[in-house]
Image (cartoon, rainbow, N blue to C red):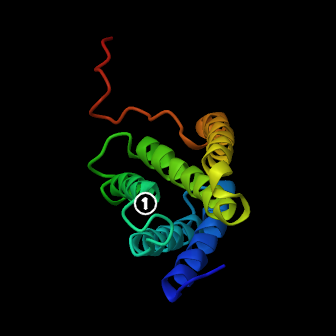
Amino acid sequence: MIHSTTGLVHICSALLAMLLGAIVLLGKKGTTTHKRIGYGYVGAMGVLNVTAFLIYDLFGHFGPFHIAALISSGSIVAGMVPVLFRHRINGWLIYHYYFMNWSVVGLYAAFWAETLVRAVPMRAFWPVVMIATLATTVVGAWLIRKNKDRFIQPTRPTLTDRQPTTA
Protein backbone atom coordinates (compact mmCIF):
# COMPACT_ATOMS: atom_id res chain seq x y z
CA MET A 1 0.00 0.00 0.00
CA ILE A 2 1.31 3.44 -0.97
CA HIS A 3 0.49 6.26 1.44
CA SER A 4 1.74 9.34 -0.43
CA THR A 5 3.19 10.73 -3.63
CA THR A 6 6.62 10.53 -1.98
CA GLY A 7 6.01 6.85 -1.27
CA LEU A 8 5.01 6.28 -4.89
CA VAL A 9 8.15 8.00 -6.19
CA HIS A 10 10.21 6.00 -3.66
CA ILE A 11 8.74 2.66 -4.80
CA CYS A 12 9.01 3.49 -8.52
CA SER A 13 12.64 4.59 -8.19
CA ALA A 14 13.39 1.43 -6.17
CA LEU A 15 11.88 -0.82 -8.84
CA LEU A 16 13.75 1.06 -11.58
CA ALA A 17 17.02 0.81 -9.62
CA MET A 18 16.46 -2.93 -9.08
CA LEU A 19 15.94 -3.44 -12.81
CA LEU A 20 18.85 -1.25 -13.91
CA GLY A 21 21.14 -2.65 -11.22
CA ALA A 22 20.45 -6.20 -12.35
CA ILE A 23 21.06 -5.30 -16.00
CA VAL A 24 24.37 -3.62 -15.17
CA LEU A 25 25.53 -6.49 -12.97
CA LEU A 26 24.61 -9.20 -15.46
CA GLY A 27 25.67 -7.38 -18.62
CA LYS A 28 29.01 -6.78 -20.28
CA LYS A 29 31.16 -4.28 -18.40
CA GLY A 30 32.81 -1.12 -19.69
CA THR A 31 30.54 -0.66 -22.70
CA THR A 32 28.58 2.47 -23.55
CA THR A 33 25.41 0.57 -22.59
CA HIS A 34 26.93 -0.35 -19.21
CA LYS A 35 27.81 3.29 -18.57
CA ARG A 36 24.41 4.67 -19.61
CA ILE A 37 22.41 2.11 -17.66
CA GLY A 38 24.82 2.52 -14.74
CA TYR A 39 24.21 6.27 -14.63
CA GLY A 40 20.48 5.52 -14.77
CA TYR A 41 20.95 3.24 -11.76
CA VAL A 42 22.85 5.97 -9.89
CA GLY A 43 20.08 8.48 -10.68
CA ALA A 44 17.34 6.09 -9.56
CA MET A 45 19.26 5.38 -6.35
CA GLY A 46 19.66 9.11 -5.78
CA VAL A 47 15.90 9.62 -6.00
CA LEU A 48 15.31 6.53 -3.86
CA ASN A 49 17.65 7.73 -1.10
CA VAL A 50 16.35 11.32 -1.11
CA THR A 51 12.75 10.13 -0.82
CA ALA A 52 13.75 7.73 1.96
CA PHE A 53 14.60 10.77 4.10
CA LEU A 54 11.09 12.14 3.52
CA ILE A 55 9.26 9.03 4.79
CA TYR A 56 8.62 8.67 8.53
CA ASP A 57 5.46 6.52 8.55
CA LEU A 58 6.97 3.42 10.18
CA PHE A 59 8.59 4.92 13.29
CA GLY A 60 7.52 8.57 13.24
CA HIS A 61 11.15 9.70 13.49
CA PHE A 62 14.60 9.06 12.04
CA GLY A 63 15.01 5.29 12.15
CA PRO A 64 17.05 2.33 10.98
CA PHE A 65 15.92 2.65 7.37
CA HIS A 66 17.19 6.22 7.28
CA ILE A 67 20.56 4.92 8.47
CA ALA A 68 20.40 2.36 5.66
CA ALA A 69 19.73 5.21 3.19
CA LEU A 70 22.83 7.01 4.50
CA ILE A 71 24.90 3.86 4.00
CA SER A 72 23.39 3.38 0.54
CA SER A 73 24.22 6.96 -0.42
CA GLY A 74 27.77 6.51 0.83
CA SER A 75 28.14 3.32 -1.18
CA ILE A 76 27.00 5.04 -4.37
CA VAL A 77 29.39 7.95 -3.82
CA ALA A 78 32.26 5.59 -2.95
CA GLY A 79 31.53 3.60 -6.12
CA MET A 80 31.27 6.59 -8.45
CA VAL A 81 34.09 8.86 -7.24
CA PRO A 82 36.73 6.37 -8.45
CA VAL A 83 35.07 6.30 -11.89
CA LEU A 84 34.94 10.08 -12.14
CA PHE A 85 38.58 10.37 -11.03
CA ARG A 86 39.89 7.13 -12.55
CA HIS A 87 42.94 8.84 -14.02
CA ARG A 88 44.01 9.89 -10.52
CA ILE A 89 43.01 6.83 -8.48
CA ASN A 90 45.10 3.70 -8.75
CA GLY A 91 42.95 0.59 -8.64
CA TRP A 92 39.79 2.62 -9.27
CA LEU A 93 38.03 -0.37 -10.85
CA ILE A 94 38.33 -2.41 -7.66
CA TYR A 95 36.65 0.33 -5.63
CA HIS A 96 33.96 0.77 -8.27
CA TYR A 97 33.32 -2.97 -8.51
CA TYR A 98 32.93 -3.59 -4.80
CA PHE A 99 31.00 -0.48 -3.80
CA MET A 100 28.55 -0.64 -6.70
CA ASN A 101 27.99 -4.38 -6.26
CA TRP A 102 27.34 -3.93 -2.55
CA SER A 103 25.01 -1.07 -3.41
CA VAL A 104 22.88 -3.45 -5.46
CA VAL A 105 23.01 -6.14 -2.76
CA GLY A 106 21.86 -3.55 -0.21
CA LEU A 107 19.04 -2.52 -2.53
CA TYR A 108 17.81 -6.09 -2.79
CA ALA A 109 18.11 -6.56 0.98
CA ALA A 110 16.07 -3.37 1.47
CA PHE A 111 13.47 -4.79 -0.92
CA TRP A 112 12.82 -7.60 1.55
CA ALA A 113 12.33 -5.15 4.40
CA GLU A 114 9.99 -3.00 2.31
CA THR A 115 7.98 -6.02 1.20
CA LEU A 116 7.89 -7.84 4.53
CA VAL A 117 6.76 -4.79 6.50
CA ARG A 118 3.48 -5.09 4.61
CA ALA A 119 3.16 -8.88 4.89
CA VAL A 120 4.43 -9.86 8.34
CA PRO A 121 3.01 -8.86 11.74
CA MET A 122 5.26 -6.30 13.45
CA ARG A 123 6.26 -8.68 16.26
CA ALA A 124 7.78 -11.05 13.66
CA PHE A 125 9.03 -8.29 11.34
CA TRP A 126 12.60 -7.85 12.61
CA PRO A 127 13.51 -11.56 12.82
CA VAL A 128 12.11 -12.20 9.33
CA VAL A 129 13.84 -9.11 7.89
CA MET A 130 17.14 -10.13 9.48
CA ILE A 131 16.90 -13.63 7.98
CA ALA A 132 16.00 -12.27 4.52
CA THR A 133 18.76 -9.65 4.72
CA LEU A 134 21.31 -12.23 5.83
CA ALA A 135 20.32 -14.59 3.01
CA THR A 136 20.53 -11.76 0.46
CA THR A 137 23.91 -10.66 1.80
CA VAL A 138 25.35 -14.19 1.78
CA VAL A 139 24.23 -14.81 -1.81
CA GLY A 140 25.44 -11.34 -2.84
CA ALA A 141 28.84 -11.85 -1.22
CA TRP A 142 29.20 -15.21 -2.95
CA LEU A 143 28.32 -13.73 -6.37
CA ILE A 144 30.62 -10.73 -5.89
CA ARG A 145 33.52 -12.96 -4.91
CA LYS A 146 32.77 -15.52 -7.64
CA ASN A 147 32.70 -12.93 -10.45
CA LYS A 148 35.51 -10.66 -9.24
CA ASP A 149 38.24 -12.18 -11.41
CA ARG A 150 36.07 -11.94 -14.52
CA PHE A 151 35.67 -8.19 -14.13
CA ILE A 152 38.82 -7.05 -12.36
CA GLN A 153 41.90 -7.88 -14.35
CA PRO A 154 45.31 -7.52 -12.77
CA THR A 155 46.77 -4.18 -13.75
CA ARG A 156 49.74 -4.19 -16.04
CA PRO A 157 52.69 -2.06 -15.04
CA THR A 158 53.05 1.17 -16.98
CA LEU A 159 56.30 2.16 -18.64
CA THR A 160 57.25 4.26 -15.62
CA ASP A 161 56.58 1.33 -13.26
CA ARG A 162 58.84 -1.12 -15.06
CA GLN A 163 62.29 -1.73 -13.75
CA PRO A 164 65.13 -1.12 -16.19
CA THR A 165 66.52 -4.31 -17.60
CA THR A 166 70.20 -4.97 -17.53
CA ALA A 167 71.90 -6.71 -20.40
Circle 1 — which element? helix
Q: Position of residue 117 (x, y in %)?
A: 64, 62
Q: Position of residue 164 (x, y in %)?
A: 28, 20
* Identity of the residue furthest to the bottom in this view: 5
Query: Label 1: which residue?
Result: 69
Q: Determine whether 115 is above or below 2 in the image.
A: above
Counting every numbered tag in the picture gives: 1
Q: Nearer the viewer, residue 81 or 66?
A: 66
Q: Is residue 165 left or right of residue 125?
A: left
Q: Nearer the viewer, residue 120 or 5?
A: 120
- Residue at figure coordinates x 34%, y 60% from the top left: 84
Judge whether residue 28 can be spotted in this image: no
Q: Is residue 91 left or right of residue 130?
A: left
- Residue at figure coordinates x 39%, y 54% from the top left: 67
Q: Nearer the viewer, residue 69 or 158?
A: 69
User: Split into 4 quadrants, where in the image is the N terminus?
Assistant: bottom right
- Residue at figure coordinates x 61%, y 63% from the top left: 114
